[in-house]
Amino acid sequence: MHGICFYSRFTFAGMSFIDLAYLRKKDLANGYITYIRKKTGQQLTIRWERSMQEIIDKYPENPTQYLLPIITRQDGMERKQYLNKILCVNRKLKQIARMAKIATPLTMYVSRHSWASIAKSKNVPLSVISEGMGHDNEESTRIYLASIQTNQIDDANNRILKEL
């Protein structure tokens, strides 16, 4: 589940993990996923892609109303299931990063940053990145991308200093 969750952030247009967890089967209709972002209450719609279906097909059908196998029981403990899953996934991603000798510990948040950063590097307009991220305004996206650039500068400086 951990690798698929990291990959799904890209596949699902940088969607936040909580929004992935709470995607409902009924949110998928007519080739699109329409959902309400938990953090902002903003409604977002993204086209259902083949790679999304491939993720779903890797797992048995979730017996709950939820699309992905993150919340698998509707017992009043859905939030706890989500929190346990993100902790587990982040722990596994950090292990993968160590095994792959990646300096930056991988987390689900890193994948969201990566989606925005890659979109920017592909000259995707800020307004589109902002909408894809579910930000209320483009200024939030500017701040978000600026923090990415700072991290990239820090990483580059670290690599340079190691060579000295």
Image (cartoon, grey):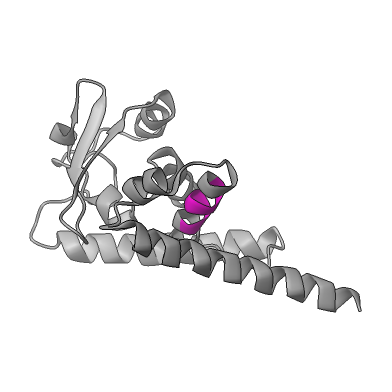
Residue in the image at 55% along x and 42% along y: 123
Number of labelled discs? 0
State the residue lying farthest toward the left. Answer: 76
Image check: 110 left or right of 67?
right
Residue at point 30%, 56% (across, down): 135
Type of secondary structure dominating the magenta stretch: helix
Q: Residue furthest top?
A: 30
- Percent coordinates x, y for residue 55 in the rendering: 40, 34
Query: Of residues 82 and 130, which is closer to you in this image?
Result: 130
Viewer-closest of 128 and 44? 128
* Residue occupying image coordinates x 36% and y 51%: 130
Query: Is 26 positioned to the left or the right of 135 in the image?
Result: left
Name the residue: 41% across, 63% down: 88
With respect to residue 52, does 76 lie above or below?
below
Residue that protrudes farthest toward the right in the picture: 164
Give x and y (percent) for residue 131: 32, 47
Q: Position of residue 71 (x, y in %)?
A: 23, 51
Left or right? Give the position of 94 relative to 160: left
Residues rendered magenta in the picture: 113-118
Residue 27, magenta (yes or no) = no
Q: Nearer the viewer, residue 96 or 156?
A: 156
Q: Position of residue 159 (x, y in %)?
A: 79, 71
Residue 103, compared with residue 65, is above or below; it is below
